[in-house]
Image (cartoon, rainbow, N blue to C red):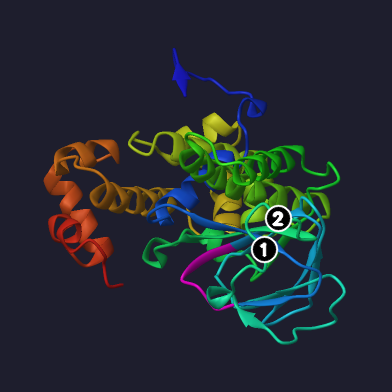
Amino acid sequence: MRENGTVMRVRLMDYVPGVDVVSDAIAVMRTGQPSSTRAAIGSSWSLGFAPYAGIGFHVALRGGCRVFPERGEPVTLGAGDVVLFPRGGGHVLTDTAADGPRNTVPFERWRPEEPVGGTGTTELLCGKYRLDRSRAHPLLAELPDLIAVAAGAGRHPELGSAVGLLGAEVRRARSGTGAVVTALLDVLLVYLLRAWFDEQAETGRRCGWTAALTDPVVAAALHALHEEPGKPWSVEALAGLAGTSRATLARRFTALVGRPPMAYLTWWRMTSAARLLRESDLPLGGIATRVGYESPYAFAHAFKRAFDVAPGRYRQAGSPQR
C-alpha cells in the first residue's frame, strides 16, 4: 500500500498465515451439509467403508481403533484422535487388538449391538463432507490419501476442544443439537487441516502448499488475495504489503503456489464466482463487482474463458461437467 508516495509495510505478524486460505479452500468445494453417525461398539469388530465422493473422517470419542486404508500402513487411533480421508478412499476400521481386517461388515449394513448411549468399549463419530471436485483447490488436491492427527494428549488443544464439544453434543441430544453438530463438524475440518499443516512445518516437511502457508511473504500475499479478491491488485501492491520486492514475491509465490500471483488471483476470482453463482441469488453485476470486474460483460467473458460456459448457463445447470 502507498501513502504520500511511500510504501507502507504491514507487519507480517498481523496475519494469521493459512487460516483464511484453508477455510476458503474447503468452502469453495463443499456442497450441502456434512453428515455424521455416532457408533458405540463392542470389544471385537470390523467395519468396512466404501470409497466416497468427498472427504471422510472418524473421531475416536472413547476407546480406540485401528484404521486399515486400501493403500499404505495401518494407523491406530486413541481417544480424541482424528483420521481424515481427503479423497474419500475406502478403508476398514477394527478394534485395537486386530492385526488386520476380518469378518468385515459394510458400515451401511451395520446395526449396533446396543443402543446409542450404550456401554460399548469404543465410541466413534464417523462422517463425511461431499465435495465438488470441479472446483478443487490445489491445497486440498495436494493432501495425502490419509491424514491422522493425535489430539487426545493436548497436542493440538483447539482440535481437542472441537472433539470434546462434538462428543458432548452427540452423547446427549438437546435443543439445537443438529445445528451445533453441523457447525462443529466444519470447525473440526479446519482445525484438523491446520494441525496437520503445523505438524508438517514443525517436522521440516515443507513443500508446496505446506511451505506456502508458512512462508511469511507468500502467506501475506495469499491472505490479501483471499481477503479482498475484488481489489485491483498488482504484483507491486502485494510485494509492498508483504514487505519485499516484486521479483522476490513473484519468484517465491510461483515456486510454492504453482502459478504467478496474478494468475492465481484470476483463478481464485473465477472459482469464487462459480460458488456464488451456484449458492447465491446475487445478480451477475453483483458477482462481477465482488470478484473484481468492472462490468458484467467483462466478467462473463472471463468466466466463459475459464469454464467454457457462460455464467448464466453455469448457474442454471447447477453442476458443471468439467
Q: Quadrant of the C terminus?
A: bottom left
> Dot 1 surroundings within 10 Å: few (below 14), some, or many (20 or more)?
few
Q: Seen in the image, is 8 located left or right of residue 118?
A: left
- Residue bearing the label numbered 2: 118
- Residue bearing the label numbered 1: 114
Instruction: Inspect this view and state whether residue 39 appears.
Output: yes
Look at the image and say whether residue 52 sits in the magenta stretch: yes
Q: Amino acid at mark 2?
A: Gly
Label 1: state its secondary structure: loop
Instruction: Inspect this view and state whether residue 258 appears.
Output: no
- 236 lies above or below 102: above
- 161 lies above or below 4: below
Quarter of the figure with residue 89: bottom right
Nearest the camera: 5 or 133?
Answer: 133
Look at the image and say whether residue 96 sits in the magenta stretch: no
Magenta-colored span: 49-56
The outermost residue toward the top is: 4
Residues tagged 1 and 2 counted as in contact (Cβ below 8 A): yes
Q: Seen in the image, is 104 located left or right of residue 54?
A: right
Residue 232: give x, y in percent of width and height. 33, 35
Residue 145: give x, y in percent of width and height. 64, 71
Label 2: state its secondary structure: loop
